[in-house]
Amino acid sequence: MSGEGLKTTDVSAKNEMVGSVLVVGAGIGGMQAALDLAESDFKVYLLDKSPAIGGTMAELDKTFPTNDCAMCIMAPKLVECTRHRNIELLSYSEIEDIEGPAGRFKVRITKKARFVDEDKCTACGDCMTNCPVRNEIYILEPEDQTMIDLPAEDRVKIEEILHQHNGEKSALVSILQSTNAFYNYLPEGVLRYLSRQLDVPLSLIYRIATFYTAFSLKPRGRHIIRVCVGTTCHVKGAPLIIETLERKLGIKRGETTEDMAFSLEEVACLGCCGLAPVMTVGDDLYGKISQAEVTKILRKYT
């Protein structure tokens, strides 16, 4: 042990050149390099100073220029890196010293303490929930005393939704889905009411509501138009379809018409690349559409 809660590890060569490699940085490039080397039968030490691998890409929602889901690209590599027999992860670690000639490097690495048993960790999040530092901060937060001005009929409907899900905190996402389906968005007053009734922090509800694209915090039209802008649809002309819809509806993507009839949105993938370009209007799906067909489709809903 080196210092308070620090573990020092040596990755060293013997007298002859050894078939092991140290990859510094476990971003998307580092993970791919580690996988390629591991498949070539090298012993790979994948090191990153962060507690988890993935790098900056793990913090992104979409990638440029196709707007593909960043996690969809990363997830297979994350799983392979953690399971590959030739890869040893050294996360939450930093290089202290490097010495020796090429092929016989000796590297001193400091691995910081996590204060949890990594072999038993299941990523359940209980350690974060019960963290004394985090709980102390949470207790010090002022209680939200904002008055909730919710009409009686809305209270009745929300109580019905809560009753359907037995008022369980664990059913929060399902409760938000039912609420979103009823209002076509998530009103602020309703979210505050749910926070009080479920005894769930409003900040947590807000994080969920802003994470999933199916939810909206502002009113949307009766008919929600979603155009796929994934790689295949992008190549097949999705941008032209969006331009046509914007021109016909008189709105930009992310906006709603004044009569609250249509809202226009774009999504990263609808899961039917064989029908590209694809758009949906509510639950109705339209594939292999052209700019000329857009007007015909809109007439069905006016």
Image: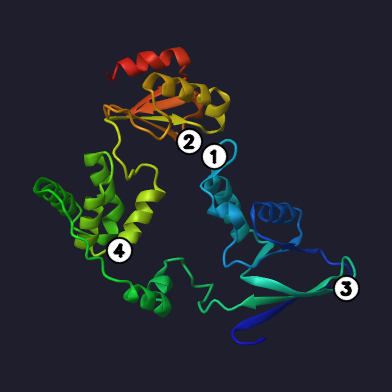
Q: Earlier in the sequence, mark 4 or mark 2?
A: 4
**Contact check, label 4 and label 2, Cβ < 8 Å:** no
Report whether 191 appears left or right of 131.
left
Q: What residue type is disc 4 on?
A: Pro
Alpha carbon distance from label 4 to label 2? 31 Å
Q: Secondary structure at mark 4?
A: loop
Mark 1 highlights which residue?
68
Q: Position of residue 145 (x, y in %)?
A: 22, 65
Name which residue lies at 26% across and 38% down: 184
Up the image or down, 62 lies above or below 37; here it is above
Residue 112, quarter of picture: bottom right
Q: Badges 2 and 1: C-beta atoms under 8 Å apart?
A: yes
Looking at the rendered structure, the kind of residue marked 1 is Asp
User: Dot 2 surroundings within 10 Å: few (below 14), some, or many (20 or more)?
Assistant: some
Q: CA distance from mark 3 to mark 2?
A: 49 Å
Label 2 – label 1 distance at C-alpha: 7 Å
Q: Nearer the viewer, residue 138 or 47?
A: 138
Front disc: 3 or 4: 4
